[in-house]
Image: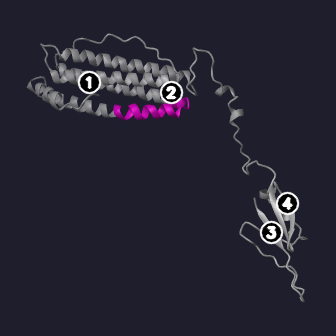
Amino acid sequence: MFLEATSAISLQGSNLGLLLNSASANSFSTPSSCNLSLLSRSSSFSSLALSRKRDNGFTGYALSETNSMPLTGVVFQPFEEVKKDDYIVPIVPQVSLARQRFSEESEAAINEQINVEYNVSYVYHSMYAYFDRDNIALKGLAKFFKDSSEEERDHAQKLMEYQNIRGGRVKLHSILNPPAEFEHVEKGDALYAMELALSLEKLTNEKLLNLHSVADSNNDPQMTYFIETEFLQEQVEAIKKVADYVTQLRMVGKGHGVWHFNQMLLHEGDGAL
């Protein structure tokens, strides 16, 4: 509230008129006979009323607020907003209570990506079983592919948890039977398996980019952020790592060099994909 004070000062024996004096940068003084039309011109005072008070020769005008509406004109009325259909809490047991701005297309795309991760995990698990055989006995490669299988399965679980967080429904699809043999006449089993792993990592990355596109086209920034932070960076790093392994296996050939490469993975392994 502004306090407006005016004073009319009479000086004895002289006719000096009226002296105007400002009390502060946000107040002004005016004689009681002054036209106060300036107040009405300012939108800041449009909701204020004047009250007059006399005391010891001073005439004071107090501005009191008559309208509590903010000057911006913007009013948030939560109890009216929540009446909209978008915010009504469902009462049907089969309907998610948490779901908000989560499209059916995004829900279906996440279920497809879960299937991709499980299929890749299944292939890596088969590779682990192959290299762990007693007549193959490349324990380093077996360890690498076992860790990789668990990593892809963890990715599937992350997607399942996210689906539930957003109010979607997890629907698991069929998983294809992976090959059980990875021997290759020209390349050898180690190089053949690692090249297959590189192709699978690139395929997974492509599927993740498609999932990101679905989220973006449905204006779902939270889902795009989830994919970017949880998967995309890790995926390109995995592609680079496996590409290095393919190059190294191509250099060492099928002989004794594969055993040394296997030992490197066994004792100095970089972890999973």
* Residue marked by disc 4: 50
Few, some or many residues within 10 Å of mark 4 (<14, 14–19, 20+): some
**Residue with the most extreme front position:** 56
Element type at mark 4: strand
Please identify the quarter of the rendering in which residue 140 is found: top left
Q: Nearer the viewer, mark 2 or mark 3?
A: 3
Q: Is residue 74 above or below residue 39?
A: above
Does the magenta-highlighted stretch encompass residue 221? yes
Q: Residue flagged by tag 1: what amino acid is it?
A: Asp
* Residue marked by disc 2: 214
Q: Nearer the viewer, mark 1 or mark 3?
A: 3
Question: Percent x, y for residue 237?
Answer: 31, 34
Cα separation, mark 4 vs mark 3, equals 11 Å
Q: Quadrant of the N terminus?
A: bottom right
Cα separation, mark 2 vs mark 4, equals 60 Å
Please identify the quarter of the rendering in which residue 249 is found: top left
Element type at mark 2: helix
Q: Nearer the viewer, mark 1 or mark 4?
A: 4
Element type at mark 1: helix
* Residue marked by disc 3: 5
Q: Nearer the viewer, mark 2 or mark 4?
A: 4
User: Which range of residues does the magenta coloring cover?
Assistant: 214-235
Q: Which residue is rendered at x = 32% and y = 19% of the image? A: 121
Q: In this orientation, which residue lies closer to the viewer: 265 or 20?
A: 20
First in sequence: mark 1 or mark 3? 3
Cα separation, mark 1 vs mark 3, equals 81 Å
Q: Residue flagged by tag 3: what amino acid is it?
A: Ala
* Residue marked by disc 1: 147
Q: Is residue 226 left or right of residue 197?
A: right
Q: Which mark is residue 211?
A: none
Question: Percent x, y for residue 259?
Answer: 11, 25
Q: Is residue 190 left or right of residue 240?
A: left
